[in-house]
Image (tube, rainbow, N blue to C red):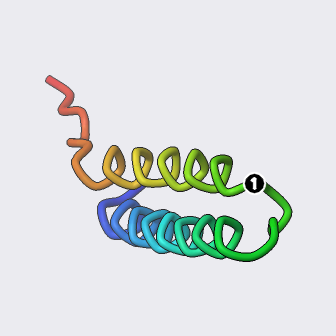
Amino acid sequence: MDKHTKHTLAEVLFSLSVVSVLLAAWSYLSSDVWLASAQWVQVATVLGVYAIYLHIKEPTQKK
């Protein structure tokens, strides 16, 4: 996977993480949207961690 693709995927995962946080707030304030609010927060956390991992991961260098 090239650098541009990883960066784009990281941005998409981060955006989905933000959407998950908004769904968590909606579920908390109103009614559940497919998952409970705590589960949406967990989804947001996992997506955010993967986004950070892809963003900071250095390509392995072959000797």
Q: Using residue 34 as the reference point, say whether residue 43 is left or right of it.
A: left
Q: Using residue 57 as the reference point, say whether residue 15 is left or right of it.
A: right
In which quadrant will I find the C terminus? top left
For this rendering, which residue is in front, 51 or 37?
37
Seen at 57% across and 45% down, the residue is 42
Amino acid at dot 1 = Ala
x, y percent for residue 26: 66, 75
Q: Using residue 6 as the reference point, say whether residue 22 is left or right of it.
A: right
Q: Please tell me in which quadrant of the rendered image residue 10 appears.
A: bottom left
Q: Please tell me in which quadrant of the rendered image residue 57 appears.
A: top left
For this orientation, the residue located farthest to the left is 63
For mark 1, what is the residue? 36
x, y percent for residue 8: 41, 72
Seen at 36% across and 59% down, the residue is 2
Vertically, is 32 above or below 62?
below
x, y percent for residue 31: 81, 71
